[in-house]
Image (cartoon, grey):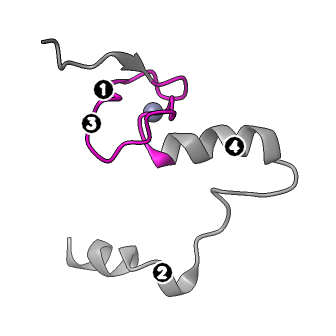
Amino acid sequence: MDAGPNRTCPICKSRFSIEEPGRDRFDVFCSGRCKMADLGHWFTDAYRIDGKPDPDSAPDSDFDQRA
Ligand SMILES: [Zn+2]
């Protein structure tokens, strides 16, 4: 049986298998991130997915200082 990637994500063009356990079989995207990115194309004017980061959930600054 061929269990390799059998789908191409329309957003990032990466190959993935839709047969993975836990994956939404109707989802044509490789990940929820790309799914949201696609939604963002439609609602870009009304709703920003990748807008300003939430200050309460942005621990990245800590890592930068320790590098
Ligand atoms: Zn993708």
Give the residue furthest to the right: 46
Viewer-proximal residue among 24 and 5: 24
* The N terminus sits in image quarter: top left
Residue carrying label 1? 17
Is residue 37 in the magenta section? no
Residue carrying label 4? 39
Marks 4/2: CA–CA distance: 22 Å
From the top left corner, tell me how far across and down residue 15 is, in percent. 34, 21
Give the residue displayed 79% in from the left and 58% down from the top: 47
Question: In the rendered structure, which amino acid carries the disc numbered 3?
Answer: Glu
Please name which of the two marks, 3 or 2, marks the residue nearer to the observer: 3
Question: In the rendered structure, which amino acid carries the disc numbered 1?
Answer: Ser
Give the residue displayed 87% in from the left and 55% down from the top: 46
Chain-order first, disc 1 or disc 4? 1
Viewer-proximal residue among 21 and 52: 21
Marks 4/3: CA–CA distance: 23 Å
Q: Residues within 10 Å of mark 3 (few under 14, many from 20)?
A: few
First to last magenta residue range: 9-32
Chain-order first, disc 4 or disc 3? 3
Q: Residues within 10 Å of mark 1 (few under 14, many from 20)?
A: some
From the top left corner, tell me how far across and down residue 21 is, in percent. 26, 42
Residue behind label 3 places its C-beta within 8 angstroms of ligand 1 = no
Residue carrying label 2? 57
Marks 1/4: CA–CA distance: 21 Å
| Magenta segment main secondary structure | loop
Question: In the rendered structure, which amino acid carries the disc numbered 4?
Answer: Leu
Give the residue displayed 16% in from the left and 12% down from the top: 2
Viewer-proximal residue among 32 and 50: 32
Confirm or deny contact between disc 3 and disc 1 (CB under 8 A). Answer: yes
Marks 3/1: CA–CA distance: 6 Å
Marks 2/1: CA–CA distance: 31 Å
